[in-house]
């Protein structure tokens, strides 16, 4: 049986300039250290805006903090005439471990389709970066099709763009739960995460499915994380708002 190391990931979205980022990472690392956080048992990662990544990298490396970090998006292109894009190779040079792809805010604001999300994830993998593939249903999807159908189909379509090998992380984020204060129940999250694991098994084989970490995201707080983490197919959380408060985010990482 494979042991999946839980991942608590903080998506800062469009918040924190590079100076604020340094303060937040420092505070987070110290808070985790004070709480004797075991990084081998629970991985903690932050996802700052692009402009913060160099400062975050320098700080983490200089202070030997055991935090990981990643980008909130990545280009599907390697280089060339793509103004405003940032390539996976550029992120790899900055020692990013992860790149979020297909966050619902990018799907909504930038009309990103599953095919685009899949190509972004493939670009990340080519550069040695683990894509955190976000899927999730809207409130209307939930009403019309139930919770699992849309996220499972999104994941199948993204996986179709990927090579069979290479580590991925999947984040189940019901759109109605993001930033709403209304999280899914642990049972709802488990049901969908289980269905997503089955879709990974279909596309990449049972062994890969067993090894892949699947996160829940949507209004996660220190008060509700324990319930999610008790579910067998939930391997961590993608946290938005609550990741901007170092003490609260550290408390989420101490979910046990
Ligand atoms: C997110 O943006 O990925 C998210 C889960 O946000 P929040 O935790 O604020 O709901």
Image: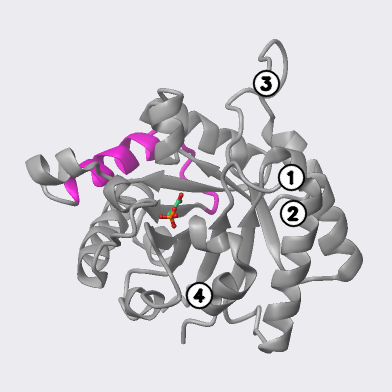
99 above or below 232?
A: above
Residue identified by numbered label 3? 84
| 100 vs 23, nearest the viewer | 23
Q: Residue at x 37, y 31 (%)?
A: 114
The count of marks equals: 4
Residue 109: x and y in percent read 44, 27
Residue 226: x and y in percent read 38, 80
Residue 6 left/right relative to 25: left
Q: Secondary structure at mark 4?
A: helix
Q: Quadrant of residue 69?
A: bottom right
Q: What segment is highlighted magenta in the picture?
A: 148-167
CA neighbours of label 4 inside 10 A, class few (<14), some (14 to 19), many (20+): many
Give me the C-alpha separation between circle 2 and circle 4. Answer: 19 Å
Q: Residue at x 31, y 45 (%)?
A: 175
Q: Secondary structure at mark 3?
A: loop
* Circle nearer the viewer, 3 or 1: 1
Residue identified by numbered label 2? 21
Q: Which residue sits furthest right?
A: 62
| The N terminus: image quadrant | bottom left
On residue 252, the disc is 4
Q: Is residue 173 magenta?
A: no
The reply to whether discs 1 and 2 touch (Cβ–Cβ < 8 Å) is: yes
CA neighbours of label 2 inside 10 A, class few (<14), some (14 to 19), many (20+): many
Residue 93 left/right relative to 148: right
Residue 136 left/right relative to 75: left
* Label whose residue precedes the other's in the sequence (4 or 3): 3
Q: Residue at x 56, y 70 (%)?
A: 249
| 220 vs 90, nearest the viewer | 220
Residue identified by numbered label 1? 17
Residue 36: x and y in percent read 68, 89
The reply to whether discs 2 and 4 touch (Cβ–Cβ < 8 Å) is: no
Q: Secondary structure at mark 1?
A: loop
């Amino acid at each position: 049986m494979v042991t999946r190391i839980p991942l608590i990931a903080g998506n800062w979205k469009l918040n924190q300039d590079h100076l604020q980022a340094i303060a937040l990472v420092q505070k987070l690392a110290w808070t985790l250290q004070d709480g004797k956080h075991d990084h081998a048992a629970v991985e903690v990662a932050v996802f700052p805006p692009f402009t913060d990544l160099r400062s975050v990298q320098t700080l983490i490396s200089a202070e030997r903090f055991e935090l990981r970090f990643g980008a909130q998006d990545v280009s599907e292109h390697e280089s060339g005439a793509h103004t405003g894009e940032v390539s996976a190779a550029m992120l790899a040079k900055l020692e990013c471990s992860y790149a979020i792809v297909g966050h619902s805010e990018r799907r909504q604001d930038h009309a990103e389709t599953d095919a685009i999300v899949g190509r972004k994830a493939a670009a990340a993998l080519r550069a040695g970066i683990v894509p955190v593939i976000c899927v999730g249903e809207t409130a209307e999807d939930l009403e019309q099709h139930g919770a699992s159908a849309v996220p499972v189909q999104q994941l199948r379509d993204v996986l179709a763009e990927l090579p069979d090998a290479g580590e991925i992380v999947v984040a189940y984020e019901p759109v109605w739960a993001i930033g709403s204060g209304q999280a899914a129940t642990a049972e709802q999250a488990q049901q969908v995460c289980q269905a997503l694991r089955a879709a990974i098994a279909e596309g990449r084989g049972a062994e890969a499915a067993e090894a892949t970490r699947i996160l829940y995201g949507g209004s996660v707080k220190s008060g509700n994380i324990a319930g999610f983490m008790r579910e067998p197919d939930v391997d961590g959380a993608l946290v938005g708002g609550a990741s901007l408060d170092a003490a609260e985010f550290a408390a989420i990482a101490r979910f046990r």
